Image (cartoon, grey):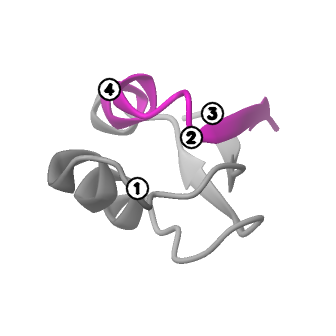
Amino acid sequence: MAKIKITQIKSTIDRSERQKRTVRALGLKKMNQSVEVEATPQIVGMVRKVNHLIAIESL
């Protein structure tokens, strides 16, 4: 599978609990933190739900 790099660029303060949990489930704990994950259908779905809070790069 392809890998993607996800970086949190906006805060989860004042966001719904569902969005906060989605960002946390992606492995992001604080601003400007990056994680590399496999681009599975489940991860891609989570990325789409919070795409306004994160930046995505293909590796």
Identify the mark at residue 2; answer none if there is no mark.
3
Q: Is residue 57 left or right of residue 17?
A: right
Could you tell me the amino acid type at mark 4?
Gly
Q: Is residue 21 above or below residue 40?
A: below
Q: For the residues marked 2 and 4, what is the alpha-carbon distance in whole angstroms? A: 14 Å
Total number of numbered labels?
A: 4
Could you tell me the amino acid type at mark 2?
Leu
Is 11 colored magenta in this rendering?
no
Q: Is residue 26 above or below residue 3?
A: below
Is the C-beta separation of discs 1 and 4 under 8 Å?
no
Q: Which residue is mark 2?
A: 53
Sequence-first tag of 3 and 1: 3
Q: For the residues marked 2 and 3, what is the alpha-carbon distance in whole angstroms? A: 22 Å
Q: Which residue is mark 4?
A: 45
The residue sitting at 38% across, 39% down in the picture is 43
- Magenta part of the chain: 44-59
Extreme residue toward the left, this view: 18
Mark 1, secondary structure of its residue = helix
Q: Which residue is mark 1?
A: 23
Badge 3 local density, few (<14 within 10 Å), some, or many (20+)?
A: few
**What x and y, as percent, mark residue 27?**
47, 68
